[in-house]
Amino acid sequence: MNWEAFWLTVRLAAIVSTLLLVIGIPIACWLTYSRWRWKFLVEAAVALPIVLPPTVLGFYVLVALGSRSPLGRWWESITGHTLAFTFEGLVIGSLLYSLPFAVQPFSAAFGAVDGSLLRASASLGDSPLQTFRRIVLPLSKAGLVTGFALSFAHTLGEFGVVLMVGGNIPGVTRTISIDIYDQVQAANYSSANQTALLLLILSFLLLSVVYGLHRFGLKRSTWAVGPWR
Amino acid sequence: MALKIIIPARIIPSRRAAPTLIRPISADLEVRIRKRFANPEGTFTLNVHFRALAGFTILFGASGAGKTTLLDCIAGLTHPDEGRIAVGGEDLYDSEMRRDVPAWRRNIGYVHQDLALFPHLTAEENVGYGLRELSTSARQERSRAILTLFRIEDLRDRRPAQISGGERQRVALARTLVTEPRVLLLDEPLAALDRPTKSSLIGDLRQWNQHHRIPIIFVTHNREEVFALGNEVIMLDNGRIVAQGQPYEVMRAPQLETVAQLSGFENVFDATVRALHNDRGSMTCQLGSSPVELETPLVRAEVGSHLRVGVRAGDLLLAIETPQGLSARNILPGTLRRLEQRDVIVSAFVDCRGAEFEVHVTLAAREELQLRPGQNVWVVVKTHSCHLMGM
C-alpha cells in the first residue's frame, strides 16, 4: 500500500473539487440563466470530458501547459519551471477533466429552483446577485454537495489525464490509480489489490453519501450526470 | 442631474414648528403601455391606458385577457414594447426616455397566485426577507408587528410546507406589505381560499390600506370579489380595456359578455333597444327585423342602440296553450317548425313571427304534449334568462 500516492491523490481531489465549487458555480449559473442562442455550444464544450478519452484531453492539456504555449510561458516566467509534470499542472488537468461532474449537478439544481421564487425575490427588492445568494444557493444545497462529491470521486480515480500531464513522479504526480498500474506491471498483485480495494470502497462510500442525501433529506435537485463511468 | 429646490430660510422654522404627517398624496399609478403577448388562443396585443388612485382597483377579465402580463409589466418582471409606467409622477418605465427601472428598485409589492413563499425560510424569515437593509432587531420588530396584524404570530418559526393554505396567503401578503410598497399588485391572491377566510383577509387588507393609502391593483375573475372590494373596476378583454368604472356600472355593462362567453348560447339575436324601464330595472329589445320584443335586464344603453341577446335553449319553456299566471315577462306565440332528438334532449325549433328559437325539452315532455311540426306553441322567456352582449 503506497500511502504517499494515496494522500497525494486525496489532496489533489480535495483541491480540485474545492476549486470546482468556486469555478463551477458561476459557469453553472451562466448556463442556467443565459438566453444566449449559442449557449448549447458552451454546454457541449463543458460536457466534453464525459465522452472524450482522457488521453486526448491529457494530450491537449499537456500542449497547453508546455513551454511553447502562452500559458506555459507565462507560468515559467513567474515560477521558473514549466507546468507540465508538476502537481499544479495536474490540478489544472483535473479541473478540466472533472468540470462537467461539478457543473452539471450545479446547473440542474439551479434550474430546479422555481422561477416564481426568483420573481418574488426581485419584487421584494433583491438584485439578481442577491437573489442568487439568498434563494438559489440555499435551495441548491443537494446539487452543490453532489457536484462536490462527484468531482472529488472522479478526480480520485483519474488515470489517463494524470499520466499524460503529470507523468509518474513519486510524491509529486504519482496518484493512486497510477500506483495500481505500476504494481500490476511489477506483478505485485496483492499490493495492487489492496490499493484498488481501498479506492473501490472509498468511491462507493462517497456515492452512497450522495445518494443517501438525495434519499433522506436534501431532495431538491435532479441528476444531470449519473455518478457512473 | 438633480434639481435643487431652494427653500427660503424663513419658511423652514415654521414648517418644523408645525410638523404634520403628510404622506405623498399623488401616489397614483399611471400606466400606458403596449405589449404583444401570447395566450393559448393566439397572440394578442396588450394595449391599455389607465390611472389607479389610492385604494382598490379591480382588474377583471377572463383568463388569457392579459391581466398577469399587465401586472408583470408594472412590477418590472417583463418589459412592455412601448409606453410609460409611472408612480406618483416618477417614471418607472418610459420607452421614449429609454428608462426602465429594474424590478428590484421599483418598490412595487407583488403577490402572485402561487404565493412563492421561500421554502427554506420560516414564516418570520419570509416576512423579513424584503427588510434586508434593516438591522436584525429592527427587522424582527417589523416582521413580528405585521405577523400580529395578520394574526399569524404563532406560525413564525414554521416553514411554508408546515402551514395551511389560508395562513400561507397571509404570510405572502405580510411579506409584501412589510416592505411598504408604493403600489400593491395582487394576482388572484384569494383564489384558493374559502369564503370566510377570504373575507377576513380582505378586511385585514382594507384595514392596512387605511393607513397606507396606496394603489392596490387586484386581479380577479370572480364577480363576487369585484362587488366585495369595490372602488374602481377595469374590465380587460384580449388585452384591451373594454369597460371601466364602478362595479355596478361595469359589471352590468353590455360589453361585459364577450364572444368567448357567447359560445354557450343556442339562441343569439341581434337586437335594438326600444325602451328603457329604469323604474323596474328592465328594458325592451326588438329582435332583428322581426316584430318580436323581449323584456330584458336593464344595462347601460340608449334607446335605438344595437346589442346582442343570448338565451340558452335550456332556459326556455314551451307551452301548447296560452300560458297564464306566469311570472315570466315574455310569452311569445309561434309555430313549431321541427323537432330534433339529440341523445335524451329534444330540440324544438319555433318560429315566433320571424325570430326562430331553439327550445330544449325532455323526451317525456315531447310524448306528453304530443309535439309535432306545424303545431301552434308559446315560448316563455324569463327576463333574467336574457344575456346581453355588446356588438
Image (spheres, rainbow, N blue to C red):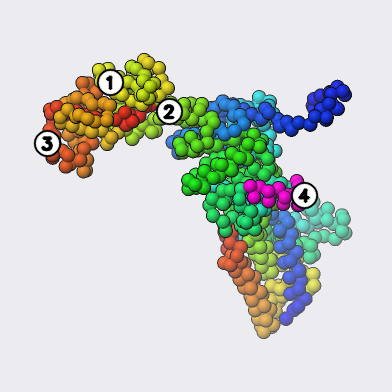
Where disc 4 sits, the SS reads loop
Discs 1 and 4 share one subunit? yes
Image-quadrant location for residue B62: top left
- The answer for how far apart the CA atoms under marks 3 and 4 are is 84 Å
Where disc 3 sits, the SS reads loop
Q: Mark 1 lies on which chain?
A: B
Residue B252, disc: 2
Image point 63% across, 73% down: which residue?
Answer: A205
The amino acid beneath tag 2 is Arg
Of callouts 1 and 2, the N-terminal one: 2
Query: Compared to A64, does B246 lie above or below?
Result: above
**Mark 3 neighbour class, 10 Å CA radius: few under 14, some 14 to 19, many 20 or more:** few
Q: Is residue B145 magenta?
A: yes
- The answer for how far apart the CA atoms under marks 1 and 2 are is 21 Å
Residue B370, disc: 3
The amino acid beneath tag 4 is Ser
Residue B293, disc: 1
Q: Which chain carries label 4?
A: B
Of callouts 2 and 3, the N-terminal one: 2
Give the residue at the far top of this rendering. B304
Q: Is residue B119 magenta?
A: no
Of callouts 3 and 4, the N-terminal one: 4
Q: Mark 4 points at which residue?
A: B135
**Residue A94: percent from the left, percent from the top?**
71, 62
